[in-house]
Amino acid sequence: MKKWTMCYFLLLACFNMFFALFLSLATARYKVIVNDMLEGQAWPLLTERVFQYLWWPWVGVVICVVGATLSLLGKPKANVKLRNLLVAFLIVELGFMFVTMVAYYLPFYRG
């Protein structure tokens, strides 16, 4: 089971790296589109905060690489804790992704 935990961490690291690269490229284009749409109006606060903290997927990459390394070097009993860490990390990261996508949608919401 040690190998499976390592594979999950490496797969998640690859997905986080892809997401981080895509997020930075998409944000550059998104800012231009929303600036044209809002015509000088203020941005929603959550959207501004998300643009300031675009580095969070890279933290996920580092955590996953460290997890894969620990899984490779660790004992089989220690992998239970690593699997729990992996599940907790996925829950937290999905929360960050949800907040990011809500923040990207907020400028288009004209309630």
Image (cartoon, rainbow, N blue to C red):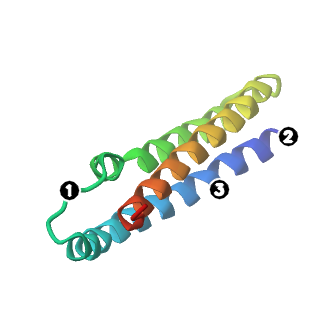
For the residue labelled by badge 1, is the local secondary structure a helix, a strand or a loop? loop
| Contact (Cβ within 8 Å) of mark 1 with mark 3 | no
For the residue labelled by badge 2, is the local secondary structure a helix, a strand or a loop? loop
Q: Is residue 64 above or below residue 36?
A: above
Q: Residue at x 71, y 37 (%)?
A: 87
Instruction: Give the Cα distance between marks 2 and 1.
Output: 51 Å
Decide which of 62, 108 is in the foreground and name it: 108
Left or right of 63: which side holds 25? left
Of circles 2 and 3, which is in front?
3
Placement of the C terminus among the 4 image quadrants: bottom left
Decide which of 107, 1 is in the foreground and name it: 107
Give the residue type at disc 1.
Ala
Q: Residues within 10 Å of mark 1 (few under 14, many from 20)?
A: few
Judging by the rendered image, the residue that carries numbered circle 2 is 1
Task: Give the percent coordinates (x, y) of residue 36.
Answer: 21, 76
N-terminal of the two: label 2 or label 3? 2
Task: Give the percent coordinates (x, y) of residue 94.
Answer: 60, 47
Placement of the N terminus among the 4 image quadrants: top right
Q: Is residue 56 above or below residue 20?
A: above
Q: Residue at x 65, y 56 (%)?
A: 11
N-terminal of the two: label 2 or label 1? 2
Q: Residue at x 44, y 63 (%)?
A: 105
Q: Which mark is residue 42?
A: 1
